[in-house]
Amino acid sequence: MTTVEKAKKYAMPNFGERDFVVESGKGCYIFDEKGRKYLDFGAGIAVASLGHANARWLKALAGQAAKISHCSNLYLTKPNADLCQALVQRIGPGKVMMCNSGTEANEALIKAARLRGLSVSGKEGAKSRIITAINGFHGRTLGAVAATAQYKIQHGFEPLLQGFSYGEFNNLESFAKLMGDDVAAILVEPVQGESGVTPATKEFLKGLRALADKYNAMLLFDEVQCGFARSGKFLACQKYGVKPDGVSMAKGLGGSFPIGAVWLAKPYQDVFTPGTHGTTFGGNPLACAVALATIAEVDSKKLEANASSMGALLSRGLRALVKKYPDKLECERGLGLMRAAIFKPEYKNTEVCAKLRENGLILIPSGANGLRFLPPLNIKAADVNKALKIFESTLEKL
Ligand SMILES: Cc1ncc(COP(=O)(O)O)c(C=O)c1O
């Protein structure tokens, strides 16, 4: 049986029909079972920050695995404490807890906001409502599903977790109308990733900060996709100069290893008292050692700056293509190395994505008609230009 046949028979069909089997990766390339090479501008959906099989990352993985991989959160480990410190140093005064994924990091933010709402109001549920943005994406566990204001994500899972209201992204007035003293938190992505890569406006995020302050609510940013140096700063909100009260991270943090993290600012850092939250796997020494190596590589190779300059190069190239092919492309948008080309409605992004793959370029569909460019943070100009070339030659033939 081939891998495709086996998966069809034994793997659940929730990811849809899949026929592309990845065998290995090196740098910004992945290889299929026949040894064919593809330029990977998906990076596992913004996960492989350093590309594939990075030397420092591999050394940290093997070194820590040989020492100890897991020992439970009943005990301390140096990699875990070091990673908490590294994140606080990069985000701001506060404390950190690790988990395994983006959705779990958001669950922790939701729980933190509700615990803090209880301590402020003194009454269970009195300050528990969370406002999120329409077309946002926060994950697939049930709290995160309730936070994700998209019918296709929520459909089938009623009754949803109560206490969520949804405002229009980049429309401050719409959020202002939803505010009240019962609001525990506002939770948004500084750049919406799954619905077509839409960056927030500065006025919007600043306005949310002011609204949260006015109603004594927390401002929480989901930086699962846009965080970890991809924007050109460690967090995308730092690019905007807006300070949150809590942040969720995952994806790029482990540079391909599953890990998530939640940071809470100083006034909220001790909201999780013993027994209120936990995880078996989250923040085990293996995951933390690998994340620390990923951070060390981001620092030593100046990958925040690289994300800015390569993002600008990519953006310029895509804007030129939007001008050249106005009948096919609507626009390009994004922040740093999180960008999308938006197609005219008559082009199906999944079909274009499949053609691009045939031509050796991996991109990721986003929203109804977008294709996302999320290359590794250490991508070089020659590879950005190569991706633009493949993109254009595919575009020409559509
Ligand atoms: C902004 C955002 N939040 C949360 C998630 C969920 O992360 P995970 O798939 O690791 O649970 C994603 C995943 O795409 C995301 O883009």
Image (cartoon, grey):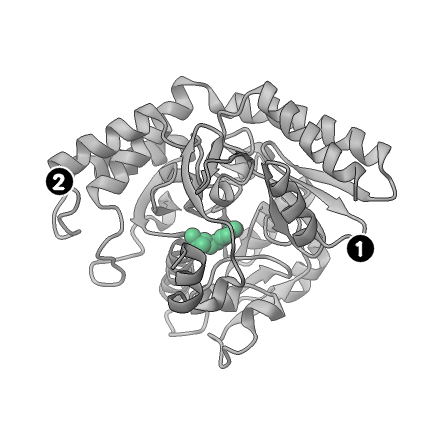
Q: Quadrant of residue 82?
A: top left
Give coordinates of residue 175: x percent, y percent.
65, 59
Q: Is residue 199 visible?
A: no
Tell me the kind of residue under disc 1: Pro
Camera-nearest residue between 307 and 23:
23
Relative to 249, does residue 393 appear above or below in the rendering?
above
**Residue at point 57%, 47% (across, down):** 209
> From the image, which quarter does the N terminus lie in?
bottom left
**Residue at point 74%, 33% (across, down):** 393
Q: Could you say which disc has been placed on residue 177 in the image?
A: none
Q: Secondary structure at mark 2?
A: loop
**Could you tell which of marks 2 and 1 lies nearer the N-terminus?**
2
Cβ atoms under marks 2 and 1 closer than 8 Å: no
- The crowding category of the residue bearing disc 2, from other C-alpha atoms within 10 Å (few below 14, some 14 to 19, many at least 20), is few
Q: Quadrant of residue 7?
A: bottom left
Tell me the kind of residue under disc 2: Ile
Mark 2 sits on what residue?
68
Give coordinates of residue 119: x percent, y percent.
35, 63
The answer to whether 31 appears left or right of 97 in the picture is right
**Residue at point 79%, 32% (across, down):** 321
The answer to whether 208 appears left or right of 228 in the picture is right
Mark 1 sits on what residue?
345
Camera-nearest residue between 235 and 207:
235
Relative to 226, does residue 369 appear above or below in the rendering?
below
Give coordinates of residue 235: x percent, y percent.
49, 36
Give coordinates of residue 194: x percent, y percent.
59, 53
Camera-nearest residue between 263 and 99:
99
Q: Secondary structure at mark 1?
A: loop
Is label 1's Cβ within 8 Å of ligand 1? no
